[in-house]
Amino acid sequence: MSERFIFTRHRTRCYHCGEDADQIIKAVSAQAQVICSACGATRIFIPRFENTGAVGTCTPIGRYDLWTLEADGRCKNCGVAGPHDLAIGCNHFTTRCRNCGYTHFYRFNLEYMAQCPLDDEGVSVPPEP
Ligand SMILES: [Zn+2]
Ligand SMILES: [Zn+2]
C-alpha cells in the first residue's frame, strides 16, 4: 500500500487471543485493517461511503468495545496533515478529519487469522485428482 493515511496502534485486550496487546490500525481510502500484534487476528473493513457532513452516532453491539482514538493522517479532502478522530467498533470503522470534518466510513468485511499453522480444520482442500 503506497498510500499512507492512518497508521496507529491501540493497546487493549485482544478479542481473539485475550492478550493485552497492541492492535495495529491501518487505513487507506480503499481499506482499513485492525491487526493483533500478538496473534495476528485481522479484521478488514471496506469503504461504505465518504462525506463531509455530520457523523451520526453508532451504537456498538457485539463483542468489541468501541474504541475512540486519535491518529494523524493526511486528509484527502482538505490536504491538511493533522489529527483525525477514529471510531472503531464491531461493524464499522470511521475516520474524521478534525480540520474539515471529512469522514470515511468503512464497514466490517471479514476476519481472518494470519497465524494459525496448527489449525487447518475448516480449510477446504481440493480433492486429489
Ligand atoms: Zn490477539
Ligand atoms: Zn480535512
Image (spheres, helix red, strand yellow):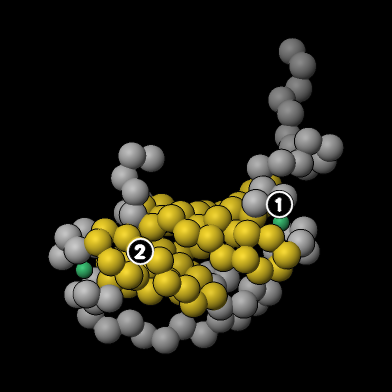
> Which residue carries the number 1 mark?
38
**Badge 1 amino acid:** Ala
Residue drawn at 17 percent across, 60 percent down? 79
Instruction: Tell us which disc is closer to us: 1 or 2.
Output: 2
Residue 30 drawn at (x, y percent): 35, 51
- Is disc 2 surrounded by few (<14), some (14 to 19) or many (20+) residues within 10 Å? some
**Quadrant of res 107:** bottom left
- The earlier-in-sequence mark between 1 and 2 is 1
Give the side of residue 55 with respect to residue 125, left or right: left
> Which residue carries the number 2 mark?
72
Residue drawn at 66 percent across, 42 percent down? 114
Residue drawn at 73 percent across, 65 percent down? 20
Residue 2 drawn at (x, y percent): 33, 39
Give the side of residue 119 with respect to residue 27, left or right: right
Judge whether residue 33 can be spotted in this image: yes
Q: Is residue 43 above or below residue 20?
A: above
**Badge 2 amino acid:** Asp
Residue drawn at 33 percent across, 54 percent down? 5
Q: Which residue ends up furthest to the top in the rendered image?
A: 129
Give the side of residue 117 with respect to residue 9, left or right: right
- Is disc 1 surrounded by few (<14), some (14 to 19) or many (20+) residues within 10 Å? some
Q: Is residue 101 above or below residue 71?
A: below
Quarter in which the C terminus is drawn: top right
Q: Secondary structure at mark 1?
A: loop
